[in-house]
Image (cartoon, grey):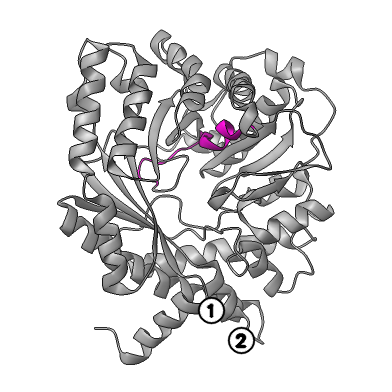
Amino acid sequence: MLTDKEILETMGMVSSQHLDVRCITMGISLFDCISEDAARTATKVYDKITSYAKDLVSVGDKIATMYGVPVVNKRVSVTPISLVGAASGGYLELALALDRAAAEAGIDFIGGYTALVQKGATAKENSFLETIPEALSRTKKVCSSVNVASSRAGINMDAVRKMGEIVKKAAYLTRDEDSIGCAKLVVFANAVEDNPFMAGAFHGTGEADKVINVGVSGPGVVKAALEKVEGDLTEVAETVKKTAFKVTRVGQLVAKTAAEMLGGEFGIVDLSLAPTPAVGDSVARILEEMGLERVGACGTTAALALLNDAVKKGGIMASSHVGGLSGAFIPVSEDIGMIEAAAMGALPMEKLEAMTAVCSVGIDMVAVPGDTPAEVISAMIADEAAIGVVNHKTTAVRVIPVYGKGVGEDVSFGGLLGRAPIMRVSGYSPEKFISRGGRIPAPLSSNKN
């Protein structure tokens, strides 16, 4: 049972420190929707999603009222569509069916327009990849992800090369909306099957038919706790750990309740610190509270490593089912501290890449000049994949070459996607390296059998 003190403490977290449940994500298996006819498959996909998720929004709102904790987003993730559509083709038809289902259910986003090509790609999967830009330009709520590497398989450089071209095409097709299509496309190494956060969520092949995953978030809560700490970095780590425990307990309660009310299985709690553009809801401000003058200063990577580790340790003690990514996110456009640091030059691309070695994801929601060549984007993906593969962690790239804009300008996407300065990228070409293709072998540490 919660004590009166704990109840009051949680109320304070919500009212003044931006504690929220960032998302309730329902994972839905679509394997039983597969047929050899594309139209029939699309109809079955639409019917199953709208049936399973019809109460997701109302239940999320009800839980928010019950516990007094905001539930910001209600989302759905599905079996990778590259698999669902393999028998029938018609991938764009499936994308449109997903978008219609999301609109009918009233959810915020639907993830799973996904392919897993970390070691190689079939002809059908290559066909699927080619549809991604058009699918993102013709839908509002569909999110796409592609896994191009794993610690076990190495890096599929043919897929990496192709994804640079796909990102560029998605930017062009949504150029009238500041290339926002790229904000719904993530390229992964070591993608996880139970991630509730968009744009990278998909329902893994090892999951049950209907699963509820919850993402909690509380950067403001962590910062407020650290404001009272006068001691050394050991005390800082202990404070973050204890705070993460409290935040995760809220997520555990919400996840179990949502699973019961929606008739699904409780999957995981993802305890990632996911920032928003709101003042007081920033991972960068946590790092600065530890003692950095500005995020991006020397010491930033060490501070982020401390934060990420302490968050994981606290969360794992709070729930037996911690999963997803569970750490600290550093999406530039979604974090007011990151935005300011990037705009003033304190956080260059090179430092951001170094930080991704110890955080939960990678080069995330970073805007770059619209004329950035496809091979440069591919090389960014390759660099992040290498960090993930060698360190046995998930890394990702969600980069937005904003059509018609350059360094010194900025772009606004609105809502949780925020705004971002256009960041400089190296002008030296990796074209010959990327054009080689093939596969970068897995590291020796992958041979564990």
Measuring 45% from the left and 44% from the top, which residue is drawn there?
Answer: 198
Q: Say if mark 1 contacts mark 2, CB within 8 Å.
A: yes
- Asked whether residue 434 is drawn in magenta, I would say no
Question: Label 1, on which residue?
Answer: 239
Task: Pick the residue in front: 338 or 242.
Answer: 338
Q: Pick the quarter of the image with the N terminus.
A: bottom left
Name which residue type carries label 1: Thr
Q: CA distance from mark 1 to mark 2?
A: 10 Å
Q: Pick the quarter of the image with the C terminus.
A: top left
Whether residue 242 appears in this view of the structure is no
Q: Residues within 10 Å of mark 1 (few under 14, many from 20)?
A: many
Whether residue 53 appears in this view of the structure is yes
Task: Pick the residue in front: 166 or 135.
Answer: 135
Which quarter of the figure has residue 280? bottom right
Name which residue type carries label 2: Lys
Q: 228 above or below 49?
A: below
Q: Position of residue 101 (x, y in %)?
A: 29, 34
Measuring 22% from the left and 10% from the top, which residue is drawn there?
Answer: 37
Measuring 74% from the left and 28% from the top, which residue is drawn there?
Answer: 370
- Asked whether residue 189 is drawn in magenta, I would say yes
Q: Position of residue 359 (x, y in %)?
A: 58, 53
Q: Nearer the viewer, mark 1 or mark 2?
A: 2
**Drawn side of residue 290 relative to residue 423, left or right:** left
Question: Label 2, on which residue?
Answer: 228
Q: Residues within 10 Å of mark 2 (few under 14, many from 20)?
A: few
**Drawn side of residue 123 relative to residue 413, left or right:** left
Q: Sequence-wise, which precedes: disc 1 or disc 2?
A: 2
For the record, the magenta segment spans 179-195
Q: 102 above or below 133?
A: below
Measuring 81% from the left and 39% from the top, which residue is drawn there?
Answer: 424
Q: Position of residue 251 (x, y in %)?
A: 35, 65
